[in-house]
């Protein structure tokens, strides 16, 4: 054997060596991918939380101008003075009614990119306002006796929920031709809200001990449900780590999936006097 052939043989990989290298690379990739995925999830969650902060700024700028929050004159009746909050603050978030509002579409809502059905009005929203807390056009100075930092203003909600449901931030009850006893019909197109008695949503009810409980036992919110399994009667989020919410003081926090239902629904009331806090 010549010296050149011997050197070539010494430099060549054996099959065993190649398999070892491939195995090491596979292990490294397996260790790296979960970390990359976690970083990506955090980045997306931060983007959604930033959107909530912008909505909070819009609500506070509206209140500073109008002397009150936007909202609803009556909880369960049609009225011309109803101002769906996300619609009322469009000019305060530099958006208009004749465009798709990117601020109101969550980056983890799997339904936000679905095309609109033919003949329908734009207005899909991945965020839902707390209907109970916005009832009666609340005055920030006196309406929130539980504390604005203890009351949820906005939570996430799939824009399309279940087989037919659609949450629209323009929508008010005066647009509805469906009667309240037809809950499934009401939820085919409805205002972008949660804890909304008109639609049969889960709401907080007194527990007889100075606190509240959900009207459906154990209910809080859904985490990453499939769109066809989305429950229109409670909020849901596409974030595996939990539900980002905007509080009335403008702060944003993440509520973990294992939250005590009584604590969650206590944060939905603005003046119930409950001592339970999410913090």
Image (spheres, rainbow, N blue to C red):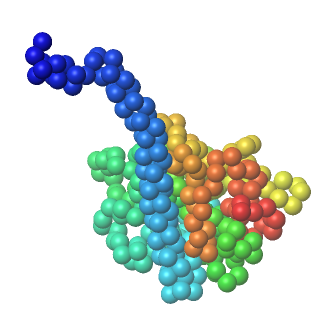
Residue found at x 34% / y 26%: 22
Residue 234 shows up from this direction: no
Give the camera-side residue of 8 and 252.
8
Q: Is residue 265 above or below residue 143?
A: above
Residue found at x 34% / y 27%: 21
| Residue 36, x across and y down, in percent | 42, 46
Left or right, 46 with reference to 231: left
Residue 229 shows up from this direction: yes
Residue found at x 52% / y 72%: 56
Q: Quadrant of the N terminus?
A: top left
User: Extreme right residue here?
Assistant: 209
Residue found at x 67% / y 74%: 148
Q: Quadrant of the C terminus?
A: bottom right
| Residue 245, x across and y down, in percent | 58, 61
- Snapshot quadrant of residue 92: bottom left
| Residue 141, x across and y down, in percent | 67, 84
Disc tally is 0
Give the camera-side residue of 52 and 160.
52
Q: Is residue 156 above or below residue 145?
A: above
Q: Is residue 158 above or below residue 211?
A: above
- Snapshot quadrant of residue 44: bottom left
| Residue 6, x across and y down, in percent | 16, 19
User: Extreme top residue here?
Assistant: 1
């Amino acid at each position: 054997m010549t010296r050149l052939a011997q050197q070539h043989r010494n430099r060549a990989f054996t099959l065993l060596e190649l398999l070892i290298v491939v195995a090491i690379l596979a292990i490294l990739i397996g260790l790296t991918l979960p970390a990359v995925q976690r970083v990506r999830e955090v980045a997306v969650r931060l983007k959604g939380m930033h959107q909530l902060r912008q909505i909070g700024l819009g609500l506070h700028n509206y209140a500073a101008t109008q002397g009150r929050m936007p909202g609803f004159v009556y909880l369960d009746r049609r009225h011309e003075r109803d101002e769906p909050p996300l619609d009322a603050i469009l000019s305060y978030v530099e958006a208009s009614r004749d465009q798709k509002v990117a601020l109101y579409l969550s980056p983890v809502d799997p339904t936000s990119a679905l095309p609109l059905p033919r003949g329908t009005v734009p207005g899909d929203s991945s965020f839902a306002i707390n209907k109970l807390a916005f009832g009666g056009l609340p005055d920030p100075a006196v309406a929130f006796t539980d504390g604005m930092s203890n009351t949820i203003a906005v939570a996430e909600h799939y824009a399309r929920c279940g087989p037919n449901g659609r949450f629209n931030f323009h929508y008010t009850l005066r647009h509805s031709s469906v009667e309240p006893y037809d809950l499934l019909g009401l939820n085919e197109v409805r205002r972008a809200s949660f804890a909304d008695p008109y639609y049969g949503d889960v709401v907080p009810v007194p527990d007889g001990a100075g606190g509240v409980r959900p009207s459906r036992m154990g209910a809080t919110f859904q985490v990453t449900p499939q769109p066809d399994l989305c429950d229109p009667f409670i909020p849901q989020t596409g974030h595996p780590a939990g539900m980002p919410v905007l509080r009335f003081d403008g702060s944003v926090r993440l509520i973990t999936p294992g939250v005590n239902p009584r604590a969650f629904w206590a944060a939905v009331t603005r003046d119930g006097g409950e001592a339970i806090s999410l913090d």
